[in-house]
Amino acid sequence: MRSQRDQDSRAFYDLSALVLSLLRSPPMPISLPDHFPDSPMMRTRSPSMAHISPSGFASLLLGISVALMLCGSVTFFIGFLLLPWVLALIVVLYVAGIVSAISMAGRSILSYVLTPPPSFSSRKDISDVEVLSRANEKLLDEKRNREAAACVADSFHRRRER
């Protein structure tokens, strides 16, 4: 896998270097072949400044554009194949969210319907009711005792005054 990546990056680097060298030094003006290729003028040129014909340059640009179109087409094809899978995943997750929401609503409704109404049959409820009733009875008893004491005191004062 790594060697494949290295080869890909190396090929891309070579292609980029070729395109940049062509863009830096545009093709030489067209000259008619009035001299033979063995002439000393051709031999003295450096290899990097080799003469490229206009048709060669056009072929190079055509090759670059075809390579980019093929890469774009492959990318488009992969995206076109994956698009239904992505849409299906989105729909499945959306449906799962809806089912989850309906399930939660159903659970809350069923628990409300199926739960018996609160009754005082449990031990804690009875003890709370008993505590409240006993406290109420104590308050009533204290009130009665005060009223009785007030009646007794009032009657005692009336007898004394007579």
Image (spheres, grey):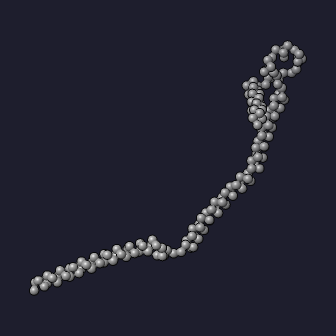
For image coordinates 20% across by 79% down, the residue present is 150
Confirm whether residue 8 shows in the render.
no
Res 3 → quadrant: top right
Res 111 → quadrant: bottom right
Looking at the image, the residue that sits furthest to the top is 40
Residue 4 percent across, percent down from the top left: 77, 35
Res 134 → quadrant: bottom left
Residue 71 percent across, percent down from the top left: 77, 40
Looking at the image, the residue that sits furthest to the bottom is 162
Counting labels gives: 0
Answer left or right for 132 relative to 68.
left
Looking at the image, the residue that sits furthest to the left is 162
Residue 113 percent across, percent down from the top left: 56, 73
Confirm whether residue 145 shows in the render.
yes
Decide: is 22 above or below 97: above
Decide: is 107 above or below 149: above
Residue 143 percent across, percent down from the top left: 27, 77
For image coordinates 86% across by 21% down, the residue present is 32
Quadrant location of the N terminus in the rendered image: top right
Q: Nearer the viewer, residue 117 or 126?
A: 126
